[in-house]
Structures are given as structure tokens and as C-alpha cells.
Image (spheres, rainbow, N blue to C red):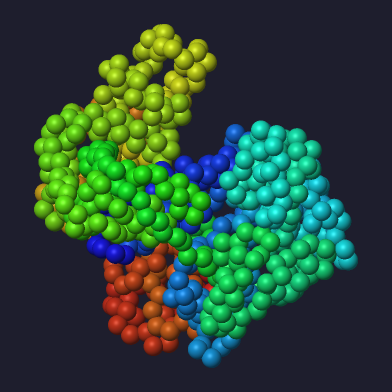
């Protein structure tokens, strides 16, 4: 990362990224109308991953790292539930990251330096993910990825794609789902747009959008009128696999009559992988289709199974994306926006500039220090980059020495006029107005009803702004008093009896909310969705949390909770020592009754227990062992304490084994641990 960042900055940025990525995901996957390029989107996701790695306790419930694609509830096509979830891939953007991926796989599998690790490498085509289900060799279902779990039924549509056979050649397994991409070649895309323009129709931004829009048609004859293609890159559900490696299965898929990448190769080292990447990159412009990188996969399927998945992506594969581009433009204006927590965020307004085919007009400038570091002022000529920290990103000021006054960062809130200050040790400038600041009050209410918090449908941003302006919503508890305003809401323009009924029903359905969601929704500084869950796992009820927080010895008890650091403790204590916050807290709890918070765990012999691995593990790496513990509902700790329930000791176990003996903690060997894993299935 280019500079240090505080926990508060990270929490705010993760919130903005989650919202932005969800917005662009919907436009890309559901509407086929993206506003930003793939590299821009990749950079947003990359920044989110960087922050989550640095601040794991700030990972949000609605984190983009947990989401695949986008929900397809608004689609005119029928829904299909995938038997095997369609995952996405993690991305890498440099040679070093690819090398680290290979090293990470080796560590996880506990491979020796001289033990071969073969990868497949193939170009990553820019299309629409599609799953083809064959039973007894006959195509019976085709579905888009959707959100990974539920996609759209496009069986009739793919019948028009010549690359997709209705019957497989040769002897295929009884059930086999081929996964791949529906795409449009460059020349076919150009011909389609020419025809659209001649007919006065909609022009598509790029071949991927054209392919997605053409496939996802309720009238499959529209699909038939446009030339789509397909190639396979993997598989989903299968009654049996016709090979022991990725390459063997892909070759069989090709023998059955489905196209695969002509550039699919085996690579025996990271050097070979990177050389293949550079070869494809050099030929990229001459290829008849759009690609945006190269995908590497562990070749051995038994190793793929051991590596498993993390969140939405496999550990055994990664996409190596091509680099992004830069462009020059003029910074015309710097506006200051006030967020939910009172942070004053500067936003640069740009003279519109095309960066790789995407028009960029706005760029975040992060904070006061970033403006000073760049030395930017309205009127400066600047460089905009499509990849990096947060995209669009202002990279460089080309005219720092021109005779213009420095930008004056405001010391008062532009919304309410309250003093705006930066706390000691922080770079963010915040409005001190709290709930008297309109920007903070409405933003806090919007956060409270958001999907990751209380998830109240029907209370969108415009509705909250409208009700706030009418004086109906001042605090979260007022949401639950809207039932007394049914007649008044019905009298407003745009509100019908059914929509009012649905809104009030959605609100009433949240009278017994999840306690962690409610806590997160209150917007306590530093208390993200994950932190809220960690607190409720420890205290189970909101009253118990408050009782603990106001005690004189609260600091020690709170910081003993995994994931809870001093900044969180200070923020929680400050919240409960502020009379106005306590009034809001008591008011909301007078309207809702969250049940005791319970944690669901996988049934196993170690569910709910704390396990420590020590010594040398001979059949698996430490990372693989910890992943197994988590899958069994156990917590993996790094040190032995009175809270430890079980120690798994391998050869060479030292002080931890000795401490376990002193504390009377059960100790087992690696073979016994393997039996526990096997018994849990």
C-alpha cells in the first residue's frame, strides 16, 4: 500500500467499497450495463481485499469477498439452482503475486522444494459464465452464473449457439456439467453494433456486454439472430470425472465436442506460467476475441480437493490480469462530502476523460493529507489511473508549480456548520455535530436499514430523505413508529396502499432482529459487521454488552475477545458514556426485542472447542489443519492457555506441549486428528 491507513479510514473505505462494488456488480451481472471497465472493477475488489487482509476484524457481512456475481431476482428468465456453486476467481496483477500464489499452494500442501507442482495456464476470455448440464450425453439445462448459487435458465437460448452440442460425442459420464464462457468475437461484435446503429437501436459498449445481453433474452429468437460462441474452462456437478488432472478432463471435454482454449498449456514452474502469460499478452491485440488475463489452476485434482475454497474462490486457481491504463485530464473542482460517521471526504470533479474506453468524471481524494501530498488544486492537470489503491485514482499532479493558491480544506462542516477536526493520531477530518448534522443523521439511518444491518426493504435512500425532511425520522427507533403514520404516508405522491402495506410489514418483520445486525446498524465507530458478531459471540445479548462496557474493568475483558482491539474498546465505551447515544440505544430497544445471539457450528467432536496445532505436521500443512478445524466448527488458536480444549501435537512439539501438560489439556497426535476429521465427513 502506498501509505499507512488508520482503522477508522479502513472501516469507512470498506463501507464505501462494499456499496460501490455491489452497485457495479448489479450493473454488470444483472443489467449488462456497466459504468466502469473491468480493470476499474478489479481494482476496487483488489483494494477491498488489501484492506480486509490488513484489518481482518473489519470484514463486513456484505463484503464483496463473500459475493459471487449478483442476485438475479429481477430477471425475466426462470431461476436455476446450481447443484455445485459457480465460484469466481481471486486476481493477481504482478509476477510477484503469481509467485506468491505458487508458494502459498506449496505451503498449504506441505510440498518439498523439489516436489513438482504442475499448473494449467489458459487465456481468460471476457464473456458471460454459463453452465451446461448434460445427462446421458444430452444437454438438459443451461444456466448463467447469477449469484453463484442461483442463475437464469438459458437452455432455449444456447440452442442457437453452434459451439454448444445438444449431444456429446463418445462416452460421457451419466451426469456432467460443463462450465465455460459465452462470448462474442470481435468481428461479430462490430457487425452487431453496425446493424444496431443502422436500425437506430442500442449500441453495446463491448463484446462482453453484447454477449450477455444477447444470451439473457426472454425471446430466444433474439439470441438466434446474434452470433455467439462458447468455450469450456471447467466443470461443476459430475457423476464421475474422466481423468485425474485438470488437463486430462479438459481434453476429454474437447473430445466430446466442446471448444476449449487453444492456448491451454501445462506449466511446471512459475517461470513457465509467467512466460506463457507474456506470450499471450503480446498476441492479445491480434486475437479474434477479447481476453483480460490468464488463469492458472493446480493440475492434480486430488490436490485441488485438499486446497478447497476460501469464501467465493478456490485456493487452487488464480487469474493473472493484464495491467491497466492511465490518462491525463484537468481537476476542475474539489467537493467535500460528509459521511455517516461525520468524515469529510474530498471528491475531485474531472474534465471527462476516456481511460481505456471508460469515461471518468470523479475521483476520490481520500482526505486532507492526500490532497497535501499530491499538492492538487482546482485547475491542475492530473494523471488518472485505472488500477491501484481505489479506482478511479488520482496518481500524479502534472502542474504543481503553476501559480494557484493551495486548496483550503474546510475546518467547519459544509452541511451543518459545526467545527470539523481531526483527532490526535488520525488523518480524517470529522464533523463534530453528530446527530444534529443532517448528513450524519440521514446517512446513519440509511446504514441502519441497509442489507448488512437491519435489512429493511422499502426504506431506500430517497424514502429516508423524504421522511427525514417531513420530520418523521430522527432516530432509528422512529422507523418502528411509522406504523402510526400509515395514513400520512398513503397521502404522499407515489405511495399506494400496497406499497405502504409492504413497507410497514417489512418493518414489523424486524421486531426481533439479529442482535449483531442491530449492533452494527447503530453505527458505533469501528464496530463493523464482523466486530459486532465477535462482541455478541462473547456477550450473547445487547444488555450484557452494555453492562460490561460501562464497568471500570471493561477494557481487559473486551480486549480479551479475539478481533477486538483498543480502538474498538474505546469506541464502544465512548458510545455508552454519551447520554444522547444511551437515549438512542434505550429508545431502539424499547421498539425491538433481539433474541439471544447464538452461533451455528458444524456438528463434530470439536465443535465449539479451541484447538492448538503444534510441532511438525507430516500429512498436511498448518494452514490446512487450521482450515479443517474451522470447517468442523472449532476455533484454531496460536497459543496454549486455560481456554484451550485440545492440542494436536506433531514431532518436535516443545513449550506448547509442556504447557498443555501443566494445564491438563487433552493432547492427541495427527492420526487421531485425522480420525476426527473423517468422522465428521
The answer to whether residue 285 is above or below residue 621 is: above
Residue 39 position in % (x across, y down): 48, 57
Q: How many marks?
A: 0
The answer to whether residue 624 is above or below residue 217 is: below
Residue occupying image coordinates x 70% and y 54%:
187
Residue occupying image coordinates x 50% and y 89%:
113
Q: Residue furthest right?
A: 170
Q: Nearer the viewer, residue 4 or 646?
A: 4
Residue 115 visible in this rendered orientation of the protein: yes
Residue 68 position in % (x across, y down): 54, 51
The answer to whether residue 483 is above or below residue 95 is: above
Residue 305 visible in this rendered orientation of the protein: no
Residue occupying image coordinates x 41% and y 59%:
326
Residue 465 position in % (x across, y down): 34, 24
569 left or right of 236 in image:
left
Q: Nearer the viewer, residue 66 or 89?
A: 89
Q: Nearer the viewer, residue 103 or 598?
A: 103
Classify residue 246 by image quadrant.
Answer: bottom right
Amino acid at each position: 500500500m502506498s501509505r499507512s491507513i488508520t482503522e477508522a479510514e479502513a472501516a469507512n473505505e470498506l463501507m464505501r467499497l462494499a456499496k460501490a462494488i455491489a452497485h457495479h456488480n448489479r450493473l454488470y451481472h444483472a443489467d449488462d450495463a456497466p459504468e466502469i471497465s473491468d480493470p476499474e472493477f478489479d481494482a476496487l475488489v483488489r483494494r477491498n481485499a488489501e484492506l480486509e487482509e490488513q484489518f481482518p476484524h473489519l470484514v463486513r457481512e456484505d463484503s464483496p469477498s463473500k459475493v459471487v456475481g449478483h442476485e438475479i431476482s429481477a430477471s425475466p428468465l426462470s431461476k436455476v439452482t446450481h447443484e455445485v456453486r459457480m465460484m469466481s476467481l481471486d486476481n493477481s496483477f504482478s509476477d510477484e503475486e503469481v509467485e506468491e500464489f505458487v508458494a502459498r499452494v506449496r505451503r498449504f500442501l506441505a510440498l518439498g522444494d523439489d516436489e513438482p507442482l504442475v499448473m494449467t495456464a489458459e487465456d481468460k476470455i471476457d464473456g458471460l459464465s454459463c453452465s451446461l448440464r448434460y445427462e446421458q450425453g444430452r444437454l438438459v439445462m443451461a444456466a448463467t452464473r447469477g449469484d453463484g448459487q442461483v442463475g437464469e435458465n438459458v437452455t432455449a437460448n444456447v440452442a442457437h449457439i453452434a459451439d454448444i452440442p445438444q449431444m456429446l460425442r463418445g462416452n460421457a459420464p451419466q451426469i456432467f456439467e460443463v462450465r465455460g464462457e459465452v462470448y462474442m468475437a470481435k468481428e461479430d461484435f462490430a457487425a452487431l453494433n453496425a446493424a444496431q446503429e443502422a436500425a437506430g437501436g442500442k449500441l453495446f459498449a463491448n463484446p462482453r456486454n453484447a454477449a450477455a445481453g444477447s444470451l439473457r433474452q426472454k425471446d430466444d429468437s433474439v439470441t438466434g439472430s446474434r452470433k455467439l460462441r462458447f468455450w469450456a474452462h471447467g466443470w461443476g456437478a459430475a457423476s464421475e470425472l474422466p481423468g485425474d488432472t485438470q488437463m486430462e478432463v479438459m481434453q476429454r471435454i474437447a473430445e466430446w465436442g466442446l471448444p476449449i482454449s487453444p492456448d491451454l498449456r501445462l506449466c511446471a514452474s512459475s517461470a513457465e506460467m509467467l512466460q506463457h502469460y507474456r506470450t499471450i499478452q503480446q498476441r492479445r491485440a491480434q486475437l479474434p476475441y477479447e481476453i483480460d488475463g490468464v488463469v492458472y489452476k493446480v493440475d492434480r485434482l486430488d490436490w485441488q480437493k485438499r486446497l478447497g475454497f476460501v469464501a467465493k474462490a478456490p485456493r487452487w486457481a488464480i487469474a493473472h490480469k493484464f495491467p491497466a491504463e492511465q490518462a491525463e485530464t484537468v481537476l476542475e473542482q474539489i467537493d467535500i462530502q460528509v459521511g455517516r460517521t461525520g468524515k469529510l471526504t474530498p471528491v475531485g470533479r474531472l474534465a471527462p476523460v476516456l481511460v481505456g474506453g471508460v469515461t471518468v468524471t470523479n475521483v476520490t481524494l481520500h482526505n486532507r493529507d492526500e490532497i497535501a501530498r499530491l499538492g492538487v488544486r482546482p485547475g491542475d492537470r492530473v494523471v488518472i489511473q485505472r488500477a491501484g489503491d481505489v479506482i478511479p485514482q488520482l496518481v500524479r499532479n502534472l502542474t504543481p508549480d503553476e501559480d494557484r493558491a493551495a486548496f483550503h480544506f474546510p475546518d467547519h462542516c459544509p452541511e451543518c456548520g459545526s467545527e470539523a477536526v481531526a483527532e490526535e493520531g488520525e488523518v480524517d477530518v470529522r464533523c463534530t455535530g453528530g446527530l444534529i448534522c443532517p448528513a450524519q443523521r440521514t446517512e446513519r439511518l440509511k446504514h441502519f436499514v441497509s442489507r448488512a444491518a437491519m435489512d429493511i426493504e422499502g426504506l431506500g435512500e430517497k424514502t429516508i430523505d423524504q421522511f427525514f425532511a417531513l420530520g418523521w425520522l430522527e432516530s432509528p427507533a422512529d422507523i418502528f413508529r411509522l406504523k402510526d403514520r400509515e395514513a400520512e404516508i398513503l397521502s404522499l405522491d407515489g405511495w399506494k396502499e400496497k406499497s405502504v402495506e409492504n413497507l410497514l410489514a417489512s418493518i414489523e418483520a424486524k421486531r426481533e432482529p439479529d442482535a449483531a445486525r442491530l449492533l452494527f446498524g447503530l453505527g458505533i465507530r469501528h464496530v463493523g459487521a464482523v466486530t459486532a458478531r465477535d462482541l455478541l459471540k462473547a456477550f450473547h445479548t445487547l444488555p450484557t454488552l452494555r453492562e460490561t462496557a460501562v464497568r471500570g474493568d471493561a477494557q481487559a475483558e473486551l480486549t480479551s475477545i479475539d478481533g477486538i482491539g483498543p480502538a474498538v474498546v474505546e469506541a464502544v465505551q465512548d458510545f455508552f458514556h454519551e447520554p444522547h447515544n444511551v437515549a438512542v440505544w434505550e429508545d431502539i430497544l424499547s421498539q425491538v426485542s433481539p433474541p439471544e445471539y447464538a452461533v451455528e457450528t458444524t456438528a463434530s467432536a470439536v465443535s465449539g472447542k479451541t484447538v492448538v496445532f503444534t510441532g511438525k505436521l507430516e500429512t498436511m500443512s498448518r494452514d490446512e489443519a487450521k482450515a479443517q478445524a474451522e470447517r468442523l466448527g472449532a476455533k484454531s488458536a496460536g497459543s496454549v492457555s486455560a481456554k484451550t480444549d485440545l492440542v494436536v501435537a506433531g514431532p518436535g512439539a516443545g513449550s506448547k506441549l509442556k504447557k498443555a501438560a501443566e494445564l491438563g489439556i487433552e493432547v492427541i497426535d495427527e492420526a487421531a486428528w485425522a480420525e476426527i476429521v473423517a468422522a465428521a465427513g
